[in-house]
Amino acid sequence: MLTPGQDFREVAEGFRWSVPRLYNIGTDVCDRWAAADPGRVALIEVADNGYGAEQRTTFGQLKDLSDRFANVLAGLGLARTVEGAAGDRVAILLSQRLETAVAHIAAFKGGHVSLPLFTLFGPEALLHRLRDSGARVLVTDRASLPLIAGIRGELPALEHVFLVDGLADVPPMPGLHDFHAELAAASPDFTPVVTRAEDPAVIIYTSGTTGNPKGALHAHRVLLGHLPGVEISHDFLPAPGDLFWTPADWAWIGGLFDVLLPALHHGIPVVACRFSKFSATAAHDLIQRFGVRNAFLPPTAMKLMKADPASRDWALKMRSVASGGETLGTELLDWGRKALGVTINEFYGQTECNMIVSSCGALEPPVPGIMGRPVPGHRVAVIGPAGEVLPDDQEGAIAVLAPDPVMFLGYWNNPKATEEKFVTGPDGRWLVTGDRGVRRPDGRLRFVGRDDDVISSGGYRIGPAEIEDCLLGHPAVQMAGVVGQPDPVRGEIVAAFITLAAGHAPSDDLRASIADHVRKRLAAYEFPRAIYFIDDMPVTTTGKIIRARLRETFSKGGTA
């Protein structure tokens, strides 16, 4: 745990990694608390988009259920991780619910590798991940079963499918099991497999915008590597009365390793509620009903909450809110203080190496447009092409020095892509994030954009994030994505794609008003010379704007 201090420097100087040689995520987040305080609440599962009945699960119950499923998996003859060689993969295609946590924890304790999958994936996305990983077991529900049935013939490695909501009236399928019936018949006595901190534990596929997603293979130590970033982005977690929730699915690193597992590590209850359709009202009501104190809110969720006129009258009193994926600006920070009662802390990372930069309102006020400082324990720098650390105020590649406890082991079955992720310089081997940034003289880092997101216009290099934040300050703008549009004179011009807030309709006058809004607030070369109104903004499942999709408009020779 981090020790609070007067400033970032004091906190960083007082921190040292303590990663044991032997470590297992499952025993850490479950068995440790079950032994110390079995009646302590671990999960609060809520039905019907947050308005229905709740089910509370204690750490003692979580241990019993995960031990039973670990025994079920052992009975299938699954291979266990041995001396760094990955054990068999257990895929989990479920949203936020008790069985999701049980399946992950059981896989960890059994020495297998868990594979989180998003319930909104289509058949091609599922086929790629299940086939590439070679998963032998899948835990899912009846809603997803038709998709699996449609691709099962192309998945020779997949032998067993467990349904968490029963088999009544389900068409027969080879290797189909009733999850809860199997648990009821299994022994509650299980001795967890002894794993090293370096042993493989989980594969999380990247949400890349080009090419097939790659599976980032992480070791058990990845949870310990996350803890400093989670703790500092939540103003020194844990505190008495803390209670966590996120609208982000637990299939992603932001939901699984930024919320669920760190919270359980600290003995903090987690509210499990995945809305079928996110709304500001439902989020507000859930936070208020359960007294949620801590939340990870992806940028898209916050923008939707802010766009709801009712949020101007919210008076929630949360303790901490963290966000990552897009740079926060003045508009969202101001809204957070008024509506949520907190200063939102921005953090930065990626699937391969997460939670490595963060702001912390408990230590210093945020600077709009600046994502924060390197989290204690991680060396993050802006480097040049040869791996050299660049001077302050010079743009370069954001990179993390290896080794690092939160850093991935490599891409599953893709050593070439793994090697391409690193560059060696005078100070050592750096993982290059693929993002551009600048280190300020005060040590904070400013995100400029993805390598392919930076706009080059008339000799200026322009990052889209600042413009997008400014656009959100216009009352007609609900969401905004900014990219470079090819231009014969300037090379590129700034183009803005806008989804409008309720009550506003596209018009030339509105285009002029939006452009003028930016022109008056940012540099003259940054205002959008082209504005396109669209009904739906393309975003990843973690809430990041897919700017590559917006740029495709121009590559096809059209406008919008």
Image: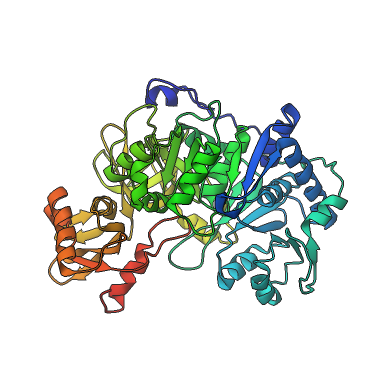
Task: Name the residue nearer the viewer: 183 or 379.
Answer: 183
Is any part of residue 85 visible from this angle? no
- Residue 30 is left or right of residue 6, and the answer is right
- Residue 216 is left or right of residue 332, and the answer is right
Is any part of residue 425 visible from this angle? yes
The scheme the figure's colours follow is: rainbow
Among the 4 quarters of the image, the one containing residue 95 = bottom right
Task: Name the residue nearer the viewer: 546 or 48.
Answer: 48
- Residue 397 is left or right of residue 513, and the answer is right
* Picture coordinates of residue 446, whole percent (x, y): 30, 43
Among the 4 quarters of the image, the one containing residue 487 = bottom left
Q: How many marks?
A: 0
* Picture coordinates of residue 147, whole percent (x, y): 64, 72
In percent of the image, x 62 and y 37: which residue is there?
A: 264
Quarter of the image where the N terminus is located: top right
* Picture coordinates of residue 54, whole percent (x, y): 64, 45
* Picture coordinates of residue 552, whole percent (x, y): 33, 72
In percent of the image, x 22 and y 70: which residue is there?
A: 486
Task: Name the residue nearer the viewer: 93 or 292.
Answer: 292
In this rendering, is residue 447 above or below 120? above
In percent of the image, x 27 and y 52: which residue is there?
A: 472
Quarter of the image where the C terminus is located: bottom left
In this rendering, is residue 64 above or below 174? above
